[in-house]
Amino acid sequence: MYGFLKHAHLTFILIAVVLFILNFYWLKTGHKNAQKAVFQKILLHTHLTIILLGALLLWFLHINPFNEHGYWALEKIIAFGAYIAMVKSALSPNKATKLQVISFLGAFGWLAYIGKLAMTKQAILLVG
């Protein structure tokens, strides 16, 4: 069960990143798909599935994010929220182009931070 949850979680992360890059490319090139709400909804549901699978992994592995040994998981949850905020800002057609590009790059910065937390399982900011 753990293997399935882990690989499903990683697969949906890959799908979400590819969709994010594709949506950003469409927005910047003026492609007609950038205006379609269906692609935004697919990205939203992909993010929700990532959250659900992550919660199931935490439950399956008996990790409490509010426990001292699980602060790394709490940091991942907070960083994922920041990533989603950056994605929303980068894909907003009402924002200035510079802000969209900074948000696009910032989203990948948050992904790198989440990946580091996942690999090391050591809290960086919530060290107590």
Image (spheres, grey):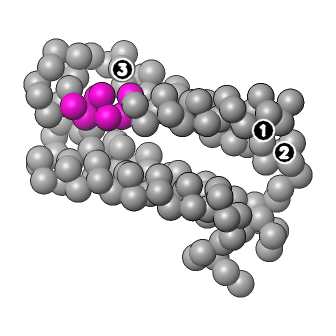
Q: Position of residue 65 (x, y in %)?
A: 75, 61
Mark 3 to mark 2: distance in Å?
Answer: 30 Å
Q: Which mark is residue 39?
A: 3
Spot the residue most to the bottom: 128
**Residue pictured at 44% horizontal, 46% vertical:** 84
Type of secondary structure dominating the magenta stretch: helix
Q: Is residue 125 left or right of residue 60?
A: left
Tell me which amino acid carries mark 3: Phe
User: In this figure, which residue is indicated by the disc labeled 1?
Assistant: 56
Q: Secondary structure at mark 1?
A: helix
Mark 2 to mark 1: distance in Å?
Answer: 5 Å
Q: Are marks 2 and 1 in contact (CB under 8 Å)?
A: yes
Q: Secondary structure at mark 3?
A: helix
Q: Residues within 10 Å of mark 1 (few under 14, many from 20)?
A: some
Q: Are marks 1 and 3 in contact (CB under 8 Å)?
A: no
Quarter of the rendering occupied by the N terminus: top right
Q: How many marks?
A: 3
Mark 1 to mark 3: distance in Å?
Answer: 26 Å
**Residue pictured at 67% horizontal, 29% vertical:** 8
Residue 127 lies, with reference to residue 6, above or below; the image says: below
Q: Secondary structure at mark 2?
A: helix
Q: Position of residue 33 (x, y in %)?
A: 23, 16
**Quarter occupied by residue 124:** bottom right
Does the image show residue 44? no
Tell me which amino acid carries mark 2: Trp
**Residue pictured at 57% horizontal, 30% vertical:** 12
Q: Which residues are magenta?
A: 19-25
Q: Is residue 125 magenta?
A: no
Quarter of the rendering occupied by the C terminus: bottom right
User: In this figure, which residue is indicated by the disc labeled 2?
Assistant: 59
Disc nearer the start of the sequence (1/3):
3
